[in-house]
Image (cartoon, grey):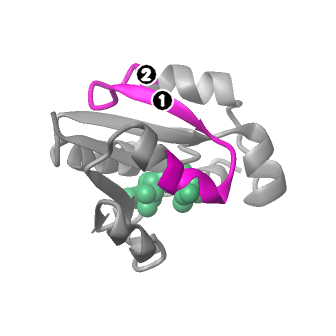
Amino acid sequence: MKKVITYGTFDLLHYGHVRLLKRARELGDYLIVGLSTDEFNEFQKHKESYNNYAERKFILEAIRYVDEVIPEEDWDQKVTDITKYHIDTFVMGSDWQGKFDFLKSVCDVVYLPRTPGISTTKIKKDLK
Ligand code: C2G
């Protein structure tokens, strides 16, 4: 079984997120999402999500492309996760291009083109 992992906040889930998850899942047979906790968002990513961790996890688990959701609590947990979950491929959107190349020593690293014209920030702004 080919296992894929990706990480993110996935707040106010939108089609850009779902397109990422779909394409990530298509790279293997099982997709794990490392979901940023509320604390990680607040203190490490310095961004606040509209949906809290439990709500974001509930929504992600309803997505057909997602097989498992684990907490992302630290920038440095990726190598441990990749080993612990026997991950073959690490995936991120292209806005992270190159930022995780150090993981190439432990798995394949794939950056997928980010979906233009949609973001959680844009949704919040457009709804004001
Ligand atoms: N994404 C995308 N297209 C968009 C918006 C987001 O492909 N229009 C992708 C991002 O590139 C990312 C994933 O969807 O791969 C989740 O996006 P965010 O929730 O914004 O994740 P981010 O805050 O970038 O956190 O350790 C990694 C971080 O947790 C990533």
In terms of secondary structure, where does tag 2 sit? Answer: helix
In this rendering, the answer to whether 93 lies above or below 19 is below
Residue 11, image quadrant: top right
Q: Alpha carbon of mark 1 to alpha carbon of mark 2: how far?
A: 7 Å
Nearer to us of marks 1 and 2 is 1
- Establish whether ligand 1 lies closer than 8 Å to the Cβ of label 1: no
Label 1 sits on residue:
69
Q: Residue at x 34, y 30 (%)?
A: 66
In this rendering, the answer to whether 55 lies above or below 3 is above
> Quick check: can you spot residue 93?
yes
In this rendering, the answer to whether 66 lies above or below 40 is above
Give x and y (percent) for residue 70: 53, 32
Residue 18, image quadrant: top left
Residue 71, image quadrant: top right
Identified by mark 1, the residue type is Val
Give x and y (percent) for residue 115: 34, 62
Say which of 88 and 36 sits in front.
88
Q: CB of mark 1 within 8 Å of CB of mark 2?
A: yes
Identified by mark 2, the residue type is Glu
Label 2 sits on residue:
61
In terms of secondary structure, where does tag 1 sit? Answer: strand
Q: Would you say 46 lies left or right of 13 here?
A: right
Q: Disc count in the image?
A: 2
Q: Quadrant of the N terminus?
A: top left
Say which of 13 and 2 sits in front.
2
Q: Is residue 66 magenta?
A: yes
Give x and y (percent) for residue 28: 17, 42
- What segment carries the magenta color? 61-80
Query: Which numbered tag is attached to residue 111?
Result: none
